[in-house]
Amino acid sequence: MRMNRLLLKSVLQQERRGYSKLSPGKKPSSEGEEINSNQDSIRENDTPTQGDSPPAANEGLFHFKELYENPWTIPNFLCIARIALAPVLGYLIVEQYFHISLGLFALAGATDLLDGYIARNWANQKSALGSALDPLADKILISVLYISLTYAHLIPAPLTALVIARDVALIAAVFYVRYKTVPPPVTLSKFFNPCYATAQLKPTLISKVNTAVQLVLVAASLASPVFHYTDSMFLQALWFVTALTTTASGYSYYHYGKKTVEVLNDTK
């Protein structure tokens, strides 16, 4: 009996010590313990594990990596060379060095034909960047030539204004498409990174015809002081045809809209 009382007394003392360790108002109930365990499990599920990232940002990064391409191709270098020739040609025309200007223009035309041939026949030399860089190089070259030829009184100013207005509108449209197709968040480093293609341009048929007509007019205008036919009806007819095809080309891009652009990702 005495042994049983001692055992009971020790058990009661242990229970009192356990209750004294609890904070005031806290009750040791099985229901409370169950609630606490549920809350802990919810916290564990809500807490992101190491290496996780927000879904939107992670998804955008994935798509952006998928769009990587090599921009350092021969056609792209030829396009850059054509852009670099533009101010040189402009200066020579303003200074009325028409013989040299005609030769350099022929060289620029050869680079245009060559980059297209290489891109069509070698798959590893074709790029989405090239599809935008090639017409951009043509537009920069044509704009500089038309301004300088107008300064030299070989092309009428209204025609030059029409050509440049169309080109400015198309370049603005290209920048808008680039902005809308770059995976979010859009940053300057992403926007101007040539390694990541987001859209490929598809010029209309009338636009290709217009580019050819504009270049023919430039060649004829450069050659006119060399071969002495600056006041010929041939040049005036070319002015009319160039104005007509330029207007039709601008309208074709407005009419066909999204059909002239192939988006390479669907992040937006």
Image: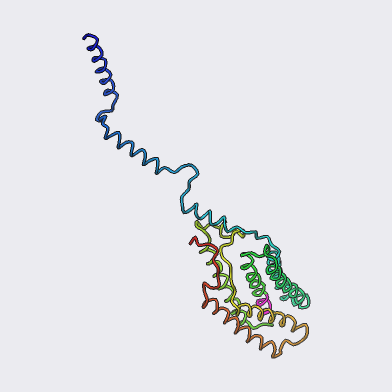
Q: Nearer the viewer, residue 184 or 28?
A: 28
Identity of the residue drawn at 62% across and 59% down: 69
Q: Is residue 55 magenta?
A: no
State the count of labels: 0
Q: Position of residue 215 (x, y in %)?
A: 68, 78
Q: Position of residue 144 (x, y in %)?
A: 66, 73
Left or right for 82, reference 189: right
Left or right for 130, reference 251: right
Report if residue 148 is visible in the image. Answer: yes
Choose top left, top right, bottom left or bottom right for residue 162. Answer: bottom right
Question: What's drawn in magenta, residue-wise?
Answer: 145-149
Colouring: rainbow
Left or right for 118, reference 24: right
Q: Nearer the viewer, residue 226 or 173?
A: 173
Q: Nearer the viewer, residue 219 or 261?
A: 261
Choose top left, top right, bottom left or bottom right for residue 27. Answer: top left
Report if residue 150 is visible in the image. Answer: no
Identity of the residue drawn at 63% across and 70% down: 136
Q: Residue furthest top?
A: 2
Identity of the residue drawn at 77% across and 86% down: 228
Q: Is residue 214 above or below residue 82?
A: below
Q: Nearer the viewer, residue 192 or 91?
A: 192
